[in-house]
Amino acid sequence: MYSRAVGVPIHSADDILAALRDHPEWRRDLLKALLADPLEVEEIRKKLLSRELLALPETFAAAEEARKADSKAVWEAIGRLTERFEAAEEARKADSKAVWEAIGRLTERFEAAEEARKADSKAVWEAIGRLTERFEAAEEARREDRRAVWEAIEKLTEKVGRLEEAQERTSATLRAFMDATEKRLHGIELELDFFAGKSMEIDARKKLGNYLRTKVRKIRRCEEDVVDSLIDTALESGLLSEEEGDELGEADALIAGKDRETGELTCVAVEVSKTVDKHDVERALRRSKIFLKASRAAISRNAPEFLQVFPRPPEKAYALVVGRRITEGARQEAKRKGVLFAKYTNGHDREGG
């Protein structure tokens, strides 16, 4: 087969296609020629198209049927979704209506509450205003009271100052009076103690027989003139020093008598004190020894006024302390040194006053 136009040999469909590629202008004419006969068109289609291409229309038809079925299912689903959406929209509208109705009621309540709040706020501010007025009035009254108080305090301070000055003058006068009174009372106390001591000493001398009865009998109290003569005679003999003479002259009482156990002459030096202490014990013991030495010295000089008291030299001396009370130290000292202690009472079963 040859092309009549150019003389191209045509042996197969491939040759036709190659010629069409080489001569594109032939395509339109060829297509018109082919489409003029339906049988030829079908024959050409079968030769030119593969089995898969030939099956495409059926495949497209099946796909279209499937598409239509899917489209129907989709539209049915869309219908159902639309119905559900419309129902949901109805419910939403109902809910929205209920919400807006609730919002309306809340708005009404809020507006009522706001009105009440405004009323309460107004009442509160009115009360605050009244309280402020009362506070300002009270503050003013407080200032007035404070001013009056400070004025009263100033006046009172002035009065207190005057009173303090007067009190100071009174205190000075009172202190002077108290000092003078204390001095006078101290002097009176000393005098009373002196007279009480003298009274006690005189009373104790009267009771020396009772105090000494367990140790000495037939006692004789040496009077002042006998004591003075005794001391002078002992001093003249040189057996007694001046200090010892002065010591013996200070004795509260000097007693002569007989020892209850031996019957020998004995002498006693007595010390009387309100409260007997160790010094009283030592003083009585020391004076008893001086009394014994002075008595022997006087007898050796044959002093007639003293021979009546001691016809012969005494053999022993006792020391006696008399008092309302005795300290524990003095008691121990008296016991250790053999000094006698007699408790003084006023004769009415109580201590002397």
Image: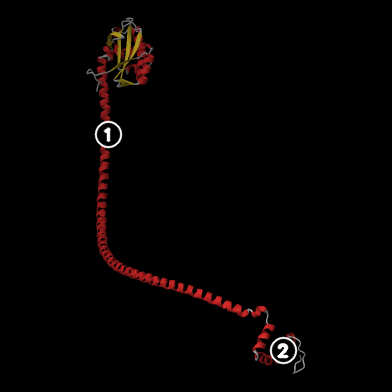
Q: Is residue 39 visible?
A: yes
Question: Where's residue 35, x and y in %?
Answer: 65, 90
Quarter of the image with the C terminus is top left
Give the residue type at disc 1. Answer: Glu
Q: Earlier in the sequence, mark 1 or mark 2?
A: 2
Label 1 SS: helix
Q: Residue 149: which disc?
A: none
Q: Would you call the spot at circle 1 few (<14 residues within 10 Å), some (14-19), or many (20 or more)? A: some
Question: Where's residue 308, x and y in %?
Answer: 28, 7
Distance CA(mark 1)–CA(mark 2): 167 Å
Is 330 drawn above or below residue 6 in the view shown?
Answer: above
Residue 304 sits in quarter: top left
Q: What residue sits right under mark 1 in the picture?
A: 182
Q: Is residue 235 visible?
A: no
Q: Residue 20: which disc?
A: 2
Residue 169 sits in quarter: top left
Is 122 drawn above or below residue 253 in the view shown?
Answer: below
Quarter of the image with the N terminus is bottom right
Q: Would residue 292 appear left or right of 36 to someone viewing this image? A: left
- Are discs 1 and 2 less than 8 Å apart at CB? no
Give the residue type at disc 2. Answer: Leu
Of discs 1 and 2, which sits in the foreground? 2
- Tally of numbered tags: 2
Of 119 and 334, the residue lying toward us: 119
> What residue occupies the far front of the structure in this picture?
39
Q: Residue at x 66, y 88 (%)?
A: 39
Is 188 drawn above or below residue 47 in the view shown?
Answer: above
